[in-house]
Structure formats: structure tokens, C-alpha cells
Image (cartoon, rainbow, N blue to C red):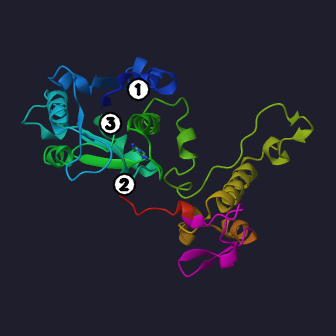
Amino acid sequence: MRIDVITIFPEYLAPLGVSLIGKAADRGLLEVRTHDLRSWTHDVHRTVDDTPYGGGPGMVMKPEPWGEALDAVIADVAPESPELLPTLVVPTPSGRPFTQAKAAQLAESPWLIFACGRYEGIDRRVIDAAVERMPVEELSIGDYVLAGGEVAVLVMVEAIGRLLPGVLGNAESVRDDSFAAGAMESLLEGPAYTKPAEWRGRAVPEILTSGNHGAIARWRRDQAFARTAAHRPELLARLDPAALDKKDRIALAALGWHIEGDRLVPDRAAEDKAPDGRAPDDFADQPPA
Ligand code: 6GU
């Protein structure tokens, strides 16, 4: 996969040269190129922003440097092979949610361009024009506001990069992740333990040293249900009851959840609360992109 990042702070992307993603790049599994947006300015001050039309606080990124930057980065695409066009990802708090499913989808693309906005965002015409040339995804990494898209790009590239073939040592580790498509899609992973078997008077759960792999898998799944019920109850409501076996139902019943028609619902609405009293709606799921 090729990844181009256009930003006014190329040094902000330096962590992509480190750790899992850096090693993947060293191994040729992914190529990251960062570009300084200011190299497509032509004034002495290398201006990338201006005041908003219509007034209001803050500054808006000017369209001209962005237009030239995108032209330059996609310049090597032959007009007769539009299937080689990259997907443009624009990190923005007003985007659609960046989810594990979206990470998996983007991991299938051979080429991504990330356009990092700062200030109050990029002049809308840049995105409107790009949509006519290539697939564009405006994506948010959560319900909070960052100062710019760079940190969101670090998040997204790491989530996407670890899904690329060969990047993780153990391909199975992706399958059991929280949110992984399939059995873990709406579940959080439970706790993990390593040696020593006893530490400061605390023993590892006995089942994990039993060697009974079926029982361990069952215990882990029950732990995932418990953790999800405690931390993200709104995720449990999304589980498809048809995908639950008898033991799943028993585990969920013990946590106060039962099946009503084709939905999993809490026994009593009052229990539909996180332990800290926060309403589960605080993490309400957004509709799929
Ligand atoms: Cl993707 N960008 C910015 N600037 N702020 C955000 C975000 C993205 N996602 C949540 N907040």
C-alpha cells in the first residue's frame, strides 16, 4: 500500500517511521510519503489560510495550495487507468465514523492520500472538486475535536496498517480483536494474563492454566460479554441473537440481557447504565457509512 500525507506539519507524522508501521515500511509492505502543503504556496509568507467568508472566528485553509498539492500527488496516474486512482481520506470531526470496518475496507485499497486540515478546515470546494476525480472519505476518529488532522492520520494509518497482509506476526491476533468482523464484531476483548502464575498474591484465573482449549475459549467469550456489558452496553444491543449459542445466552442472561424477538435487550431499562451512571447513549453507535 502507498500512503501520501499532505500536511503543514510533516514532522508530526514522524511516528509512522517507528514501531509496527515503521517496520512494515522497512519491509516494503507499505510506503509512506509525507508532503509539506507549503511547498505548493507561491507567496513569501507561504500562506495556507485566510479569513472565512461570512465572518466568524478562526481561519480556513485556502483552496489553491490544496488543489496544486492533490494535482501533484496524483500526477503519475495515467488517464486511461482510473482504477489506479487513490482514495482521498480527509480527517475531520464532521466526518463519518472511522471504525474497524472502515479500517478493514481502506486496508484493501492500494493507495490512500490523507489531507490534514488545520484551523477551521479546508475550503469546501477542494473536497467537492476531489469527489469528481477520486473516491473521497471524510472520517472522524471520535466525538471530540483535535487541533488538526495529523493525530487522526496517525490513528487511522496504524489501524489500517496492522491489517495489511504480513504486517502482524500472528494473523490470528487480528481475528480476536475487539470489533473484529465476525464473532467479535460488537464485543470488547476481555482481560489477558502472562507469567508469573501468581503476582503479589494474585493468581491467574485457573481456567487459563487448565490446558482445556474449549473451556478457555468459552471463558474468554464470557469475559468479553461481561466487559462489553460493563463498558459499552450499547454494543450488546447490536448483537444478532441468531449468532448466539446456548452458552452465549446463559452468559448474557447472567449479565441481565435477554432476547426479545430479533433483538438483545437489557432486562430492565434501569440496568442499561454504565457503572459510573453515565447513560450508554454517550457512546451511541452511529449509522454505518
Ligand atoms: Cl479526524 N480530525 C480532527 N481535526 N478532529 C477530530 C477528528 C479528526 N476526529 C475527531 N476529532
Does the stretch in magenta take in 260?
yes
C-alpha separation, residue under disc 3 versus residue under disc 2: 16 Å
Q: Position of residue 160 (x, y in %)?
A: 42, 38
Residue 12: image quadrant is top left
Image point (35%, 58%), residue name: 289
Quarter holding ligand 1: top left
Numbered disc 1: secondary structure: helix
- Quadrant location of the N terminus in the rendered image: top left
Q: In the displayed image of the protein, which residue is found farthest to the bottom? A: 261
Q: Which amino acid does label 3 sit on?
A: Cys
Q: Is mark 3 within 8 Å of ligand 1?
A: no
C-alpha separation, residue under disc 1 versus residue under disc 2: 23 Å
Residue 277 can be seen in this image: yes
Q: What residue type is labelled 2?
A: Arg
The residue carrying mark 1 is: 13
Mark 3 vs mark 2: give the one in front: 3
Along the viewing direction, whichever of 191 and 35 lies nearer the viewer: 35
Q: Earlier in the sequence, mark 3 or mark 2?
A: 2
Residue 122: image quadrant is top left
Image point (15%, 23%), residue name: 43
Q: What residue type is labelled 1?
A: Leu
Residue range (magenta): 255-281
Does the stretch in magenta take in 13?
no
Q: In this view, does 52 lie to the left or right of 244?
A: left
Numbered disc 2: secondary structure: strand
C-alpha separation, residue under disc 3 versus residue under disc 1: 11 Å
Q: Which of marks 3 and 1 is nearer the N terminus?
A: 1
Q: In this view, does 264 lie to the left or right of 65?
A: right
Q: Position of residue 256 (x, y in %)?
A: 71, 72
Q: Height in image: 166 above or below 159? A: above
Along the viewing direction, whichever of 260 and 36 lies nearer the viewer: 36
The residue carrying mark 2 is: 96
